[in-house]
Amino acid sequence: SGMNREGVPGKSPEEMYIQQKVRVLLMLRKMGSNLTASEEEFLRTYAGVVNSQLSQLPQHSIDQGAEDVVMAFSRSETEDRRQ
């Protein structure tokens, strides 16, 4: 088949979201932002994901493109919280 999905570990949308959020929170923290208590709790809950993401994060400073994405993401997250 043209799909060629065999042998590729499938990630559920939830896992993808968790991975994405962990990555964003790590970037925010790396950029010197203070995380909220719930964000810190999230990172503690998914410590395993955090460790795998940390190993993938670039060690040098984050490029501007990624920073823009992070800021946009965190803004939408913050607006969600206020509702």
Image (cartoon, grey):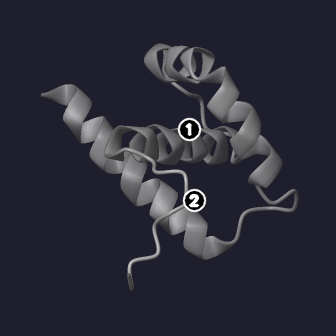
Quadrant where the C terminus is found in the figure: top left
- Taking 42 as reference, is 23 left or right? right
User: Label 2's element?
Assistant: loop
> Image quadrant of residue 43?
top right
> Residue at the location (82% across, 46% down)?
55
User: Label 1's element?
Assistant: helix
Where residue 72 sits in the image (x, y, percent)? 38, 58
Amino acid type shown at disc 1: Val
- Taking 25 as reference, is 21 left or right? left
Using the image as rendered, state which of residue 16 and residue 39 is in the foreground: 16
Amino acid type shown at disc 2: Gly
Alpha carbons under labels 2 and 1: distance apart:
25 Å
Using the image as rendered, state which of residue 12 and residue 74 is in the foreground: 12
- Taking 64 as reference, is 37 left or right? left
> Image quadrant of residue 44?
top right
Is 23 rendered above or below residue 37? below
Is 16 rendered above or below residue 58? above
Front tag of 2 and 1: 2
Residue at the disc numbered 2: 7
Check residue 55 in the rendering and tell me which mark sits there, or answer none: none
Where residue 16 sits in the image (x, y, percent)? 44, 47
From this viewpoint, which residue is outermost toward the front? 1
Q: How many marks?
A: 2
> Residue at the location (48% across, 41% down)?
21
Using the image as rendered, state which of residue 42 and residue 60 is in the foreground: 42
> Residue at the location (28% across, 48% down)?
76
Residue at the disc numbered 1: 22
From this viewpoint, which residue is outermost toward the bottom? 2
Classify 10 Å Cα crowding around label 2: few (below 14), some (14-19), many (20 and above).
few
Using the image as rendered, state which of residue 28 and residue 55 is in the foreground: 55
